[in-house]
Image (cartoon, rainbow, N blue to C red):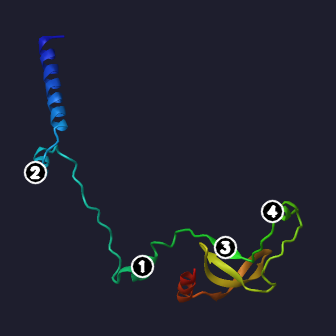
Amino acid sequence: MSAENQDALADEWAAALEQQAAADAAPATVEEATETAVSAPQVQATLFKPFASGGMGGGNNDIEMILDIPVQLTVELGRTRIPIKHILQLAQGSVIELDALAGEPMDVLVNGCLIAQGEVVVVNDKFGIRLTDIVTPSERMKRLNRN
């Protein structure tokens, strides 16, 4: 290794050691930290598109933001409680008695929240539900407050 290369390498090591010593010496005050700070990356504020006038009750334009969000729709025919020993005895063709009566409205739930009631219909050999009663937002709030 030539003398010039050794000198350059020694200078690099000296500079690195000085930087390490400067980093180890914590500034005593905020002013000192600001003065000795190494160029830090600049942080920029993120700007979000404001909602339409009226804030949360923005209007129909804002509803488009959530139209593609999937939700779980459940149609509940009824419920029952049975012991595990009866579940183990179930076979093809077994009938489980539910607490709902024939012809009684079924509950339609979205993400577990009751939104409507309806009745079973058959269209082209497929079961469906015809909505007979929609739960209003005020009724949904009353139900939430009860729980």
Q: Secondary structure at mark 4?
A: helix
Residue under circle 2? 31
Q: Secondary structure at mark 2?
A: helix
Q: Are marks 1 and 3 in contact (CB under 8 Å)?
A: no
In percent of width and height, residue 108 lies at 66, 79
Mark 1 or 4, nearer chain start = 1
Amino acid type, label 2: Glu
Q: Is residue 83 above or below residue 129?
A: above
* Disc 4 residue crowd, few under 14, some 14–19, many 20+, Cα 10 Å: few
Amino acid type, label 4: Ile
Alpha-carbon span between mark 1 and mark 3: 28 Å
Alpha-carbon span between mark 1 and mark 2: 48 Å
- Residue at image coords 12%, 17%: 7
Residue under circle 4? 84
Alpha-carbon span between mark 4 and mark 3: 24 Å
Residue under circle 1? 61
Alpha-carbon span between mark 2 and mark 3: 61 Å
Amino acid type, label 1: Asn
Alpha-carbon span between mark 1 and mark 4: 51 Å
Q: Nearer the viewer, mark 1 or mark 3?
A: 3
Residue under circle 3? 74
Mark 2 or 4, nearer chain start = 2
